[in-house]
Structures are given as structure tokens and as C-alpha cells.
Image (spheres, rainbow, N blue to C red):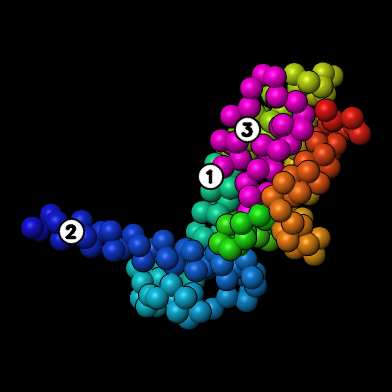
């Protein structure tokens, strides 16, 4: 019985922590870090202020954790998409995999889109905690470059890194810009049909990105 109660408390604590992260992500996506208050987060999560101190220590630590969690989810999804490609995948297939998590978020909206906007908002000024995700950033770029190198020879590692980072920046801008809101109103198939060729062109450095 003691062990069962301990497990129940642990599960309840994890639910509270997850709820605080979700609430913080949604509010950060809407307003950025300067527009979020501790009370708003706890009210949305149905938690009390002491829960923030217990699980995170401070409002800033909670926001940093929420941003880091959002980015990690995004990178994991992106890495999984690219890993599903085959050796016969073309440049547009690679672009579709790279943009897959963002396109799904645009199509679905809600919390998924809030998470993507959180990632995009802080991309220009990342918190210190992002350092632990350097390996995942590098893996994502390395995997994309490996697939593209098989289709487009003669591009060195430094240039691939530049192209891929530019493509990522384009996605970040899109999800925050008015044109991204317009795109989100379109069916998923239309989002992919419009976005993938543009991204493929950026990655390939050519108008012919087949």
C-alpha cells in the first residue's frame, strides 16, 4: 500500500509538472517570454504557485524548461521523419521530412502549433539550456546532408550546414509570419504542395529540386 501511494503521488506530481509545461508553452507561443506571468500559467494549468517552486524553482526556470522541452520534441520528430527516408528519396522527399513536424502543426493547430511557435520565437535568442541539445541539432543537419549529398554532389559540409540552417530559419519565420497563418487555413495537402518545393529549392540551391 505504501508503494502504491508513493506511485500515485509520483504520477500526480508528473501530471502537474506536465500541465505547467504545457500551459507555459501555450502562453509563451502567444506572447513571448516578457508577456507571461506566473499566475496565468498556474491558473491555466490548474496548479498552485508552490508547484512551480517545487518542480522548477522559478518562473524563468519553468519558461526555459518549457522552451527546451518544445524544441526537443520538435527535433526528435524531425530526426524521426528524416530517418524514415530511403536511399531512393529525392530532394523534395527530404524537404518534406525536414518540414514534416512544422507542416503537421500548421494543419492541426492548437497546442502542436503553439509548441512550434514557441520554438520559433526563441530561435534567435536561445536559452542556455539549449546547449544539451547541440547533439540533436547536429544529428538533424547531418542526416539531412547525408541524404542530399547523394543527390547533389560537390557541396561541402560547411555549405550544407548553411543551407539547412537557412531552411530551418525559413520554417521558423513562416510559423510566426502572417503568411503562416494564411497557410494554416489551407488543407494539409495544399500546405505540403506549396511549401515543400520552396524548401527543396533552398536546400538544393537550384530551381530544379526533383
Q: Quadrant of the C terminus?
A: top right
> Which numbered dot is residue 82?
3
Spot the residue most to the left. 1
User: Residue 140 at x, y = what percent?
Assistant: 63, 35
Report how far apart the C-alphas of labels 3 and 1 lie in the structure. Answer: 21 Å
Q: Quadrant of residue 36?
A: bottom right
Q: Secondary structure at mark 2?
A: helix
Kindly report which numbered mark, 3 or 2, lies closer to the viewer in this rendering. Answer: 3
Q: Secondary structure at mark 1?
A: helix
Q: Earlier in the sequence, mark 3 or mark 1?
A: 3
Name the dominant secondary structure of the magenta segment: helix
User: Residue 1 at x, y = what percent?
Assistant: 8, 58
Q: Residue at x 52, y 60 (%)?
A: 66
Query: Quick check: 95 above or below 187?
Result: above
Q: Residue at x 51, y 54 (%)?
A: 69
Q: Quadrant of residue 159?
A: top right
Q: Earlier in the sequence, mark 2 or mark 1?
A: 2
Amino acid at each position: 500500500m505504501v508503494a502504491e501511494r508513493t506511485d500515485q503521488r509520483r504520477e500526480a506530481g508528473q501530471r502537474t509538472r506536465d500541465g505547467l509545461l504545457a500551459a507555459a508553452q501555450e502562453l509563451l507561443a502567444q506572447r513571448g517570454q516578457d508577456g507571461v506571468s506566473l499566475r496565468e500559467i498556474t491558473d491555466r494549468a490548474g496548479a498552485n504557485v508552490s508547484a512551480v517552486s517545487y518542480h522548477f524553482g522559478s518562473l524563468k526556470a519553468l519558461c526555459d524548461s518549457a522552451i527546451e522541452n518544445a524544441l526537443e520534441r520538435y527535433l526528435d520528430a524531425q530526426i524521426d521523419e528524416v530517418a524514415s527516408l530511403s536511399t531512393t528519396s529525392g530532394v523534395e522527399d527530404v524537404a518534406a521530412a525536414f518540414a514534416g513536424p512544422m507542416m503537421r502543426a500548421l494543419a492541426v493547430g492548437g497546442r502542436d502549433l503553439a509548441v512550434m511557435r514557441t520554438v520559433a520565437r526563441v530561435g534567435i535568442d536561445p536559452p542556455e539550456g539549449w546547449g544539451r541539445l547541440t547533439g540533436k541539432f547536429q544529428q538533424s543537419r547531418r542526416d539531412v546532408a547525408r541524404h542530399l549529398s547523394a543527390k547533389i554532389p560537390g557541396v561541402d559540409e560547411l555549405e550544407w550546414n548553411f543551407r539547412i540552417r537557412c531552411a530551418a530559419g525559413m520554417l521558423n519565420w513562416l510559423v510566426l509570419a502572417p503568411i503562416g497563418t494564411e497557410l494554416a487555413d489551407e488543407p494539409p495537402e495544399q500546405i505540403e504542395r506549396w511549401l515543400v518545393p520552396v524548401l527543396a529549392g533552398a536546400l538544393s540551391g537550384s530551381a530544379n529540386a526533383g
